[in-house]
Amino acid sequence: MHKVIITVAPTGNVPTKALNPATPVTNDEIVQDLLLCQAAGASIAHLHVRDVNENPTSERTLFKDLCSKIDSQNINMIKQLSTGARGGQNTIDYRGQMLDLNIEMASLATGSSNFPTSVNGNSPELIEALATKMYHNNIKPEIEVFDSAMIANVNWLIKKGIIKSNLHFNLVMNVPGSLKGTPRNLMFLKESLPQGSTFSVSGIGKSQTDMLAMAIILGGHVRTGLEDLVEYRGSLMTNEGLVQNAANLIRSLGREVATTQEAKSILGL
């Protein structure tokens, strides 16, 4: 029976204090949430940072400060930094400036898609440059999939020799403007993955419970957190509560929650 990895995405680029007062927007707040989420069962921290005005950014100094604070609190979680398109300038240097830090994983979108009010722009040149920097810094990419073409595009990176085998994907379901979170769509993506890959699933908004349950049943892993779900059935969520819900779902389906060491083994870190 496979162990299930829980990834927590505590803040993302969209949630604000105005939307949900529990949203952590400073590095200190993120670290405090991670302590609670680790105790609840999360073993990967998918990390974004905010500037002094609470706007999303890719500033290396803020990522370095966050990683240092995580280490100082003895948080034993896999650090996975976001290189996403909504963190400020859409240039290679800006998007990848944090990839020389001592981290295990980073996100890598292998194509472009739509967000509700903007384009998730990832040019072939940018994708190759970010993947190359991850390769040279021994960082395992989590390939973020918003559309099926992003899976197909991975073959191009493999042929160039800048993505190692033992691939890991995150199937992001139900982003407005991108692929809807339906069982049919998730099955299609899962069946399109290269043989031997591992995968997790993000269910955005109201799709979360269904998508995470399907991920577990299909042999995958799960992601939750306020980046993905701020409110459910009229109740504001917390990162700790969302991780607890994911852990309960895993156990209810007869699986076990993976420890951080088990997650490293599963992912080949």
Image (cartoon, grey):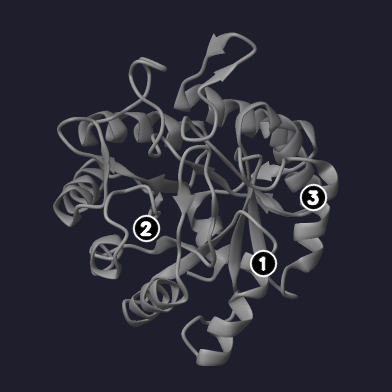
Q: Which mark is residue 149?
A: 1
> Mark 1 to mark 3: distance in Å?
13 Å
Specify the farthest residue to the top. Answer: 234
Q: Give the number of the disc on residue 83.
A: 2
Write the residue at 65% across / 59% down: 199
User: Separation of disc 1 and disc 2 at Cα?
Assistant: 19 Å
Is residue 74 toward the left or the right of residue 227 in the image? Answer: left
Q: Earlier in the sequence, mark 2 or mark 3?
A: 2
Residue at the (48%, 47%) spot, across then down: 43
- Crowding at dot 3, Cα within 10 Å, few <14 / some 14-19 / many 20+, comes out as some
Q: Residue 222: percent from the left, percent from the top? A: 62, 45
> What's the residue type where badge 2 is placed?
Thr
Identify the residue at the far right of this view: 184
Residue at x 37% of width, y 58% of height: 83
**Apparent side of residue 14 relative to residue 256 in the rendered image (left or right):** left
Could you tell me the amino acid type at mark 1?
Answer: Ala
Question: Which label number is shown at residue 185?
Answer: 3
Are discs 1 and 2 less than 8 Å apart at CB?
A: no
Q: Nearer the viewer, residue 36 or 101?
A: 101
The disc, 1 or 2, on the residue closer to the chain's N-terminal end is 2
Please name the amino acid that badge 3 sits on. Answer: Asn
Q: Which mark is residue 118?
A: none
